[in-house]
Amino acid sequence: MSLYQEQFSAATKAQFESQLAWLTALTGKAFESVEKVIDLNLNVAKASFEESTANFQQLLSVKDPQEFFALTAAQTQPNAEKALAYSRHLAGIVSGVQAEFTKAAELQVAETSRKVASLVEEVSKNAPAGSENAIAFIKSAIANSNAGYEQITKSTKQAVEALEVNINSAATQMVQNAGKVNGRASAAAKK
């Protein structure tokens, strides 16, 4: 086997092992995140069931329609605040996962780029005369792919940040609207 084939074979094997380790780490992070979401949903479901039972018992004890409307209006604001807290917690989990994936991807790309550049450099030392243009082309292609990856990473981070802002804005509006509904229902109950 020639020197080049041995170098490429060793580089390919190392790259495969590196990617396998990276995928294993990402899979572990994904499972951790799913566990967090399931735990959050179970806690929310349990609390919601307990609160629904208590609210239903309160509604059964209502004597007149005004008391009924006042009680339902009083329950609107806390429910909206709980929904806001849930959405923020969920967004925090998603944001954490995205940050972990981005960090892992950046490390993987940096390591792969370093290894490929090292391999190209090693091959270029032993390359026959006249192959300078081909090696320059390969180096340029590597640099361009790294620049493209950096742009994609920046765009992804911006998109996630915009999503978080939109989620927080929508949740805040939901709480404000629930407060308005609560105020109107209280005013209607007093009439």
Image (cartoon, rainbow, N blue to C red):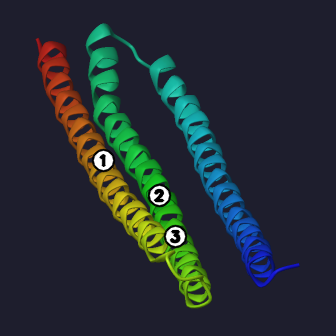
**Which of the labelled discs sits on residue 174, or is there none?**
none
Q: Nearer the viewer, residue 133 or 140?
A: 133
| SS state under label 1 | helix
* The image quarter in which residue 57 lies: top right
Q: Is residue 152 above or below residue 183?
A: below
Left or right, residue 133 beside residue 189 = right
Kindly identify which residue carries mark 3.
109
Q: Is residue 136 above or below residue 60?
A: below
Cα distance in 3D space between marks 3 and 2: 16 Å
Kindly identify which residue carries mark 2.
98
The image position of residue 140, as x and y in percent, is 38, 68
Seen at 56% across and 85% down, the residue is 118
User: Furthest residue to the front?
Assistant: 129
What amino acid is found at the position of numbered circle 1 in the picture? Ala
| SS state under label 3 | helix
Seen at 47% across and 64% down, the residue is 102
Sequence-earlier tag: 2 or 1: 2
Kindly identify which residue carries mark 1.
159
Q: Nearer the viewer, residue 84 or 21?
A: 21
Q: Nearer the viewer, residue 87 or 147?
A: 147
What amino acid is found at the position of numbered circle 3 in the picture? Val
Cα distance in 3D space between marks 1 and 3: 20 Å
Cα distance in 3D space between marks 2 and 1: 11 Å
Seen at 60% across and 34% down, the residue is 49
Sequence-earlier tag: 1 or 3: 3
Q: Is residue 184 above or below residue 149?
A: above
Mark count? 3
* Mark in the foreground, 1 or 3: 3
